[in-house]
Image (cartoon, helix red, strand yellow):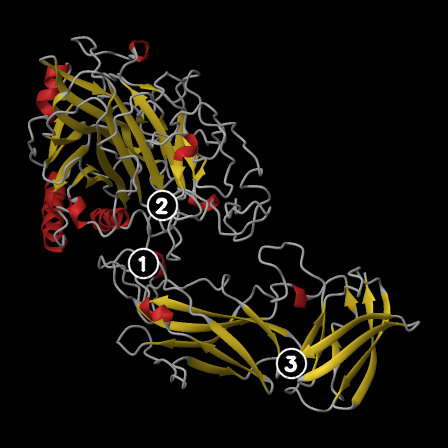
C-alpha cells in the first residue's frame, strides 16, 4: 500500500489545479454563459402541465459507447451495476452491444470504474424526511420505475440541408456524409395521424423524436410541447431553435447535439418497482426525473459524457426543503478482478477549483499499470447561488445510510468532507441545495459530466473541456468558416481569388477570433487533394509565411501554374485556426510536432469549384478545338464533383466538353447521316470551354455512335468527330 506516494501526488495535483483553475469554481453559474439557455426546453421551471403520461414501462438497458468511455444505463436511472445487467427481464436496446460497460475506459481494455450510480431526490413531505433513490450502494435500494423506453438520437445522422424528395425540407442526410438519404425526412403526409403533416411548410411541425410515430397528442419527449405544437421559430421548417451547424441560422436540421444521445424518464410513484426498500419502508415524494445523456466520438470530447437531469414535482403536495444529489459507488480495477480486490483499494477527494469529485485506484494493482482516476464535474446546479456539497463514506466502516432520515441528513448537511487518501470501498455523493420548496409542476435542473483520463492531469484537462462544451451549448471547437472564392482560367494556369470573411470567424468555445491561415487545395479525381499553397499570419504561431497581398477589390489572389491542360481540376480554399480553444489546451488530436499548432481546418469537401484549363486561352483560331473525352465511354471524370452536377445527386449528369474555343462560337452536332442533333451557342468569355449534356434538341438522350461537330466563329469553321460508347 503506497499511501504516502498517493498523498504527495494528490497534494501536488491539487496545488497545481488551484493555480490553473482560471476561476472556474462558478463556471456553472448561468449568468456566465456565453450561450442563452432558454431554448433548453428540458429545464422549464414554470412548467405546470401534470398531464404527461407516467405509466410504467419495461426495464431496459442502453450503452454509451460512442467515445472512449463505455457505460451501460438502465431506463430506471441506474448507471452501471454489473449484478443486474444479465437479468432476462432487463433486455438491452436492440442493436446495443451487451457489454460489461461498468464505465469502462478506454473502452475495450477491461479497466472499469463504476459499480453503480444514480440520482437522489430529498425533501420534507408532510413533516417527514424522505429521499427517493435510484440506487444507494450495496443495499441496492431502487425506488424509481421507468415511464419511457430509451430514446436515442445522434447529430451524426442529422440533416445537412439537402431536400431529396421535394417536400420542402432539408432533414435528409441519414448518415452524415453530406449527401441525401432517400426519404429520411418522411413522406409528404401526416405520418403519425396527429393532424400535422410531417416536416411540411407550415408554421407548426411535428416534433416527436426520430422513431416516435405516436398519435396520442402527448408530450412524448417531455419538452413541454405536445406533438406538432413545437413552433418553427425562424421559418426554416425544422424545429430546434439553435444554430447547430454554425451557418448563422437557428432552428434547422436536428435537435441532436452529440454523436450519441440517450433520453429516458422515471418516477418514484411505482410501488411494484421497488427493489430492496429502505429499512423504514417506502414513501414516494411524487417526482419525475428526465435524464438526457450525451457522448461524442471527436477526440476533443471523447473522454467525458454529459448528463442532464430535470426533476419535476408531479404530485399534489408541496415538497419542502428540497435537496438533489448524485450518488456514485465506484470500484476501480480490471474486470477480471473478483471479490473485493477491485473495490477495497480506492481513494476519493474533491477539487474545489473545478467543482469535481474524484475517485481513484490507489495502487494500480489488478492488471492496471498505474493509478487510475475518474471524476464527476458539476456543470449546472438548480440555482447558481447554492453550495455543492461533497460527501464520502466507506462500506468497510459501515457508514452507508440505510433509511430515509439518514440519507436526508447526509445530503442536506451541505458539507464538504475531507479527502480520503486511505484505501477503502469508498462512495461519494454530490449534493445540491438548499432549494426551498418545489411546488406541483415545478422543475429543477442539474447537469454533470463524468470525466475520465489516464492521469490526474488529463482529468483536469478533460474536466475543463467538458465545461467549455457545456458553455457552448454542447458544440465543440470549430474551424473558421471557409472563404468564398472564384476561379479564372489563364494561359495554362488558374487564378484563385478569395475573400476575407474567414478572418472574422469566432470560435464557439473561446468566443474569440482565432483565424490563423488559408490553404489552397487541388484534386484531379475529386478525392485525393494536393496542397497548392499555404499562408498564415506572421504572429509567432505556425510557420509565419504571411498572407498574400490584397488586390484592388480587397481580396486575395494566387496563380496556380501547375495545372495540367484539358483535365478538370477541382479546387478548394480552406481556412484554419490557431489551435487555441480558449481553455489553454490545444486540440489534442491535432497537435503538430512541426509548427506547434493544434489547428482545426474547414472542410475541403464542402466548398469546391471546378475548371478545365485549355492549352491556351480563348483565341480567334479554331485549330486547337478538341472534344474531351473522346471517346466518351459510359461516364467521364468531368462529371464527378463537377459544376454541372446537382447538389446531392448521386447519378452524375452525362457531359462532354469542347475546349480551346474562342470567346464567341456556335457549335452544331450531327449524326453521320447529317441529322442535326443539338446546337450550342457559346458565350464563354475567356473560359474556352463549352459543355454538351448528351441530350438532343427534343430532350432525348443521345444514342451511342459516331457524331460530327461543326464550330463556327469569326468567319471560320472547323469540322471534327467524336465517339459515344455506352
Q: Which label belongs to residue 127?
A: none
| Picture coordinates of residue 104, whole percent (x, y) | 34, 36
Q: Which of these two is toward me, 649 or 725?
A: 649
> Is there any visible trace of residue 244 in the rendered image?
yes
Disc sitting over residue 565 in the figure: 3
Q: What is the secondary structure assignment of the residue under circle 2?
A: loop
Q: Residue 232: image x %, image y %?
A: 40, 43
Bin the neighbour count of mark 1 within 10 Å (Cα to Cα): few under 14, some 14-19, many 20 and up: some
Choose top left, top right, bottom left or bottom right for residue 416.
top left
Quadrant in which the C terminus appears: bottom right
- Mark 2 against mark 3, which lies toward the viewer? 2
Q: Earlier in the sequence, mark 3 or mark 1?
A: 3
| Dot 2 alpha-carbon crowd within 10 angstroms: few under 14, some 14 to 19, many 20 or more | many
Residue 376 in picture, x, y percent from top left? 22, 38
> Viewer-proximal residue, 372 or 621?
621
Q: Helix, strand, or loop for circle 3?
A: loop
Could you tell whether 517 is left or right of 454 in the image? right
607 is higher (above) or lower (below) than 470: below
Outermost residue to the front: 203
Residue at mark 2 to residue at mark 3: CA–CA distance: 48 Å
Contact? badges 2 and 3 (CB < 8 Å): no
- Is 138 placed left or right of 336 in the picture? left
| Residue on which disc 1 sits | 587
Between 265 and 231, the residue placed more toward the observer is 231
The label on residue 241 is 2
| Up/down of 356 relative to 464, above or below | above
- Looking at marks 2 and 3 on the same chain, the residue that comes earlier in the sequence is marked by 2
Residue occupying the point 33% across, 25% down: 265
N-term-proximal mark, 1 vs 2: 2
Amino acid at each position: 500500500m503506497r499511501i504516502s506516494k498517493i498523498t504527495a501526488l494528490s497534494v501536488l495535483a491539487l496545488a497545481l489545479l488551484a493555480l490553473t483553475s482560471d476561476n472556474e469554481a462558478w463556471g456553472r453559474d448561468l449568468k456566465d454563459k456565453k450561450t442563452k439557455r432558454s431554448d433548453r426546453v428540458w429545464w422549464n421551471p414554470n412548467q405546470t402541465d401534470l398531464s404527461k403520461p407516467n405509466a410504467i414501462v419495461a426495464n431496459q438497458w442502453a450503452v454509451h459507447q460512442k467515445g472512449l468511455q463505455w457505460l451501460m444505463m438502465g431506463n430506471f436511472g441506474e448507471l452501471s451495476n454489473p449484478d443486474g445487467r444479465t437479468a432476462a427481464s432487463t433486455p438491452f436496446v436492440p442493436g446495443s452491444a451487451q457489454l460489461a460497460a461498468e464505465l469502462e475506459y478506454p473502452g475495450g481494455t477491461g479497466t472499469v470504474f463504476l459499480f453503480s450510480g444514480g440520482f437522489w431526490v430529498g425533501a420534507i413531505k408532510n413533516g417527514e424526511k424522505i429521499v427517493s433513490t435510484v440506487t444507494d450502494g450495496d443495499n441496492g435500494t431502487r425506488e424509481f420505475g421507468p415511464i419511457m423506453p430509451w430514446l436515442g438520437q445522434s447529430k451524426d445522422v442529422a440533416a445537412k440541408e439537402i431536400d431529396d424528395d421535394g417536400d420542402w425540407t432539408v432533414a435528409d442526410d441519414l448518415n452524415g456524409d453530406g449527401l441525401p438519404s432517400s426519404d429520411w425526412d418522411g413522406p409528404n403526409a401526416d405520418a403519425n395521424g396527429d393532424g400535422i403533416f410531417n416536416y411540411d411548410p407550415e408554421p407548426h411541425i411535428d416534433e416527436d423524436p426520430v422513431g416516435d410515430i405516436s398519435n396520442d397528442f402527448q408530450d412524448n419527449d417531455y419538452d413541454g410541447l405536445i406533438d406538432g405544437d413545437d413552433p418553427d421559430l425562424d421559418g426554416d421548417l425544422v424545429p430546434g431553435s439553435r444554430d447547430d451547424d454554425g451557418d448563422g441560422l437557428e432552428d434547422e436540421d436536428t435537435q441532436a447535439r452529440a454523436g450519441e444521445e440517450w433520453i429516458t424518464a422515471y418516477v418514484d410513484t411505482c410501488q411494484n418497482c421497488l427493489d430492496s426498500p429502505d429499512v423504514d419502508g417506502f414513501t414516494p415524494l411524487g417526482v419525475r426525473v428526465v435524464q438526457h445523456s450525451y457522448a461524442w466520438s471527436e477526440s476533443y470530447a471523447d473522454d467525458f459524457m454529459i448528463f442532464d437531469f430535470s426533476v419535476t414535482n408531479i404530485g399534489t403536495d408541496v415538497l419542502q426543503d428540497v435537496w438533489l444529489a448524485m450518488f456514485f459507488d465506484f470500484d476501480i480495477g480490471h474486470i477480471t478482478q473478483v471479490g473485493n480486490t477491485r473495490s477495497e483499494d480506492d481513494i476519493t477527494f474533491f477539487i474545489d477549483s473545478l467543482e469535481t469529485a474524484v475517485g481513484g485506484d490507489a495502487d494500480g494493482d489488478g492488471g492496471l499499470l498505474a493509478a487510475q482516476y475518474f471524476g464527476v464535474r458539476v456543470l449546472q446546479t438548480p440555482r447558481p447561488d447554492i453550495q455543492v456539497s461533497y460527501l464520502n463514506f466507506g462500506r468497510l466502516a459501515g457508514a452507508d445510510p440505510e433509511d430515509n432520515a439518514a440519507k436526508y441528513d447526509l445530503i442536506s448537511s451541505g458539507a464538504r468532507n475531507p479527502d480520503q487518501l486511505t484505501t477503502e470501498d469508498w462512495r461519494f455523493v454530490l449534493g445540491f441545495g438548499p432549494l426551498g420548496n418545489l411546488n406541483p409542476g415545478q422543475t429543477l435542473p442539474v447537469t454533470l459530466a463524468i470525466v475520465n483520463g489516464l492521469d490526474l492531469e488529463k482529468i483536469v484537462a478533460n474536466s475543463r473541456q467538458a465545461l467549455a462544451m457545456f458553455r457552448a451549448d454542447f458544440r465543440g471547437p470549430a474551424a473558421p468558416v471557409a472563404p468564398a472564392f472564384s476561379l479564372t482560367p489563364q494561359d495554362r494556369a488558374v487564378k484563385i481569388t478569395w475573400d476575407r470573411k474567414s478572418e472574422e470567424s469566432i470560435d464557439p468555445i473561446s468566443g474569440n477570433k482565432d483565424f490563423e491561415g488559408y490553404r489552397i487545395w487541388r484534386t484531379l479525381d475529386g478525392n485525393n487533394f494536393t496542397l497548392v499553397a499555404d499562408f498564415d499570419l506572421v504572429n509567432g504561431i505556425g510557420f509565419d509565411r504571411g498572407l498574400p497581398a490584397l488586390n484592388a477589390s480587397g481580396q486575395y489572389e494566387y496563380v496556380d501554374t501547375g495545372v495540367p491542360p484539358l483535365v478538370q481540376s477541382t479546387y478548394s480554399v480552406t481556412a484554419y485556426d490557431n489551435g487555441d480553444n480558449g481553455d489553454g489546451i490545444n486540440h489534442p488530436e491535432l497537435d503538430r510536432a512541426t509548427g506547434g499548432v493544434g489547428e482545426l481546418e474547414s472542410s475541403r469537401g464542402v466548398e469546391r469549384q471546378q475548371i478545365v484549363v485549355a492549352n491556351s486561352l480563348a483565341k480567334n483560331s479554331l485549330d486547337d478545338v478538341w472534344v474531351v473525352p473522346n471517346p466518351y465511354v459510359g461516364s467521364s471524370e468531368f462529371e464527378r464533383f463537377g459544376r454541372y452536377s446537382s447538389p446531392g445527386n448521386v447519378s452524375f449528369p452525362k457531359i462532354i466538353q469542347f475546349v480551346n474555343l474562342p470567346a464567341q462560337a456556335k457549335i452544331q452536332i450531327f449524326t453521320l447521316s447529317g441529322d442535326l442533333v443539338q446546337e450550342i451557342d457559346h458565350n464563354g468569355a475567356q473560359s474556352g470551354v463549352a459543355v454538351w449534356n448528351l441530350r438532343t434538341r427534343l430532350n432525348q438522350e443521345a444514342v451511342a455512335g459516331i457524331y460530327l461537330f461543326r464550330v463556327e466563329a469569326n468567319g471560320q469553321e472547323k469540322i471534327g468527330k467524336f465517339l459515344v460508347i455506352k
